Image (tube, rainbow, N blue to C red):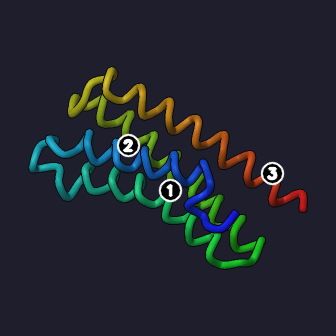
Amino acid sequence: MKSYRDLVVWQCAMDLAVAVYELTKNWPRDEIYGLTSQIRRAATSVPANIAEGYGRENRGSYLQFLRIAQGSLKELETHLLISGRIGITSAQAVEPLLADSERIGKLLRGLIRRLAEK
């Protein structure tokens, strides 16, 4: 593996972040500093933390950043659920993103397990 960009989990997290930006681009302007900002920050934090941990070149640091990415992923899921509950978006729009998030979470857990075993 030459780069974090070769990691499937990073690629999937990048796709999810782009999908979140697409979902939120037409949200109400009064949410720009509220939920829109929070959900975008959480979404971009996932691939950013995967990349940052990889760049540390230290297994302990890498594991810590992967765990931070997991936390950001759960934060993102929560924001998506809130957006549906308050009527900013539909359950139909949120469901595929939650499914993607679940897949990324499984990939992250697998990567963490493999690194922790070494």
Q: Amino acid at mark 2?
A: His
The earlier-in-sequence mark between 3 and 1 is 1
x 36%, y 29%: residue? 94
Determine the secondary structure under disc 3. Answer: helix
In 3D space, how far apart are the residues under numbered discs 2 and 1 (Cα atoms)?
14 Å
Q: Are marks 2 and 3 in contact (CB under 8 Å)?
A: no
In the rendered view of the protein, which quadrant contains the N terminus?
bottom right
Closer to the camera in the image, 84 or 114: 114
In 3D space, how far apart are the residues under numbered discs 3 and 1 (Cα atoms)?
18 Å
Mark seen at residue 113: 3
Q: Residues within 10 Å of mark 2 (few under 14, many from 20)?
A: some
Q: Nearer the viewer, mark 2 or mark 3?
A: 3
x 34%, y 36%: residue? 82
Residue lying furthest front in this view?
A: 2
Closer to the camera in the image, 16 or 4: 4
Dot 1 corresponds to which residue? 46
In 3D space, how far apart are the residues under numbered discs 2 and 3 (Cα atoms)?
27 Å
Dot 2 corresponds to which residue? 79
Q: Is residue 65 left or right of residue 18?
A: right
Q: Are marks 3 and 1 in contact (CB under 8 Å)?
A: no
Quarter of the image where one finds residue 87: top left
The earlier-in-sequence mark between 2 and 3 is 2
Q: Amino acid at mark 1?
A: Val
x 77%, y 71%: residue? 59
Quarter of the image where one finds residue 103: top right
Q: Nearer the viewer, mark 2 or mark 1?
A: 1
Determine the secondary structure under disc 2. Answer: helix
Q: Is residue 13 left or right of residue 36?
A: right
Horizontal and vertical percent for residue 65? 62, 66
Q: Amino acid at mark 3?
A: Arg
Horizontal and vertical percent for residue 28? 12, 43
